[in-house]
Amino acid sequence: MTNDKDIDSLLAKYLAEETDPQEATFLDEWLDESDEHQKIWTQSKQIWEGASSIQTKQSVDVDCAWNKMRACLFDKKKIDIQQEDTNKLIIPLPQRPSISFKAITQLAASIILLIGVFLIGYQYLKTSSIAAESTLIQLTSNQQIIEKTLPDGTHIRLNKNSKLSYPSKFEGKTREITLEGEAFFDVHHNNAQPFIIHAQQNDIRVLGTSFNVITNKEGVHVAVKTGRVQFSNAQERVILVENEEASFSVSENRILKTSAPVAIQRSFVFEHTPLKEVVSQLSHEFDMIISLESPNLGNCELSASFENEKIENIVGVIAATFNLTSKKTGDGYVFFGEGCK
């Protein structure tokens, strides 16, 4: 059983508890093959259970209806007998077709089941239609690095010559986007709505974490900074945790995982950015405390870009730009100087 029609038939038999052990084993293996199979199973089960629920709630009392019919027949027969006594005429009763209780019950159940399936299917299509109403937004970086916060609160930094597609509003059970090029993600945590990045024929699935993704003609590379990431395609699946990386190689058509610590790609573009905002962003990205000795330093505006530079190099450039002195502390850096007006 490999085509959709056979699978639908097998799911129906399973829900009706009519499968043999061999068919049940095949279905278990089929469900483990992919998340898409799990989704098909869930939808089929919902339709079946919904139909059963409607059938239970809208039961038909066939015996009561039949008894009423019998009563009507009996009253008509009494009238005919009375007329026979009065008029001395014999009037034959019309012959009615015989309908079994079982046939009526089966017909009523079939109608209820069809109504249930229709209502559930209509609700599913309506929900899908609403989700499709979200506008798809295309974000292209060209020759600049773009910082962006998505509708769910996820922060992304899109590197040069990259493209990101995402909906104007995340609806449904997942948050799904598509990436071409390179981007760093700091995903807003949401257990009920996993975040999925489509990169070529691969998917990166997370709940809330930070990681870097690179896509190019050679394949897809994922490097995890914090949290846990699932990196998968139709053939295989790997789980990555903090300081782990994996690459999908187009030439080898497989995912290769590395447990060694990885260097997270960091790119910064500041254009007339107040120094107090600069040190705040650097502190967050490098997980350290970078501060200003005087509040007046916060008014200085920095216009500079850094790509994969070490923090000590960035600190040196900032100090030289504003004629400041920097001092390394136990958990970061401090800038000293007169400041800007």
Image: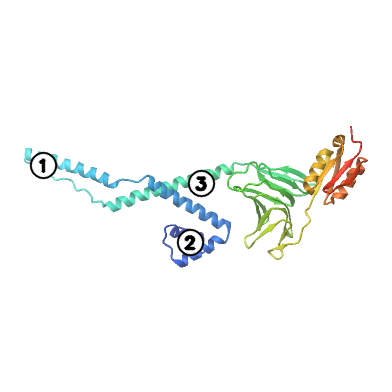
> Residue, x 49% and y 44% (percent of image)?
123
Q: Nearer the viewer, mark 3 or mark 2?
A: 3
**Which of 67 and 90 lies nearest the eye of the viewer?**
67
Q: Earlier in the sequence, mark 3 or mark 1?
A: 1
Q: Residue 38 location, x and y as percent? A: 54, 56
Q: Is residue 149 left or right of residue 128?
A: right
Residue where numbered disc 2 is placed: 6
Q: Earlier in the sequence, mark 1 or mark 2?
A: 2
Instruction: Kindly report the distance in space between the C-alpha atoms of the residues bearing marks 1 and 2.
Output: 61 Å
Q: Say if mark 1 contacts mark 2, CB within 8 Å.
A: no
Residue type at the position of mark 2:
Asp
Q: Which mark is residue 124?
A: 3
The amino acid type of the residue labelled 3 equals: Tyr
Number of labels in the image equals 3
Name the residue carrying label 1: 81
Distance from disc 3 to disc 1, alpha carbons, whole Å, reads 58 Å
Q: Which mark is residue 150?
A: none
| Disc 3: CA contacts within 10 A as few (<14), some (14-19) or many (>=20) | few
- Element type where label 3 sits in the image: helix
Q: Residue drawn at (63%, 41%), measured in percent from left and top?
A: 169
Q: 116 and 266: which one is in front?
A: 266
- Label 2: how many residues lie within 10 Å, few (<14), some (14-19) or many (20+)? few
Residue 328 percent coordinates (x, y): 87, 47
Expressed as whole percent of the image width and height from the top left, the position of residue 56 reads 38, 47
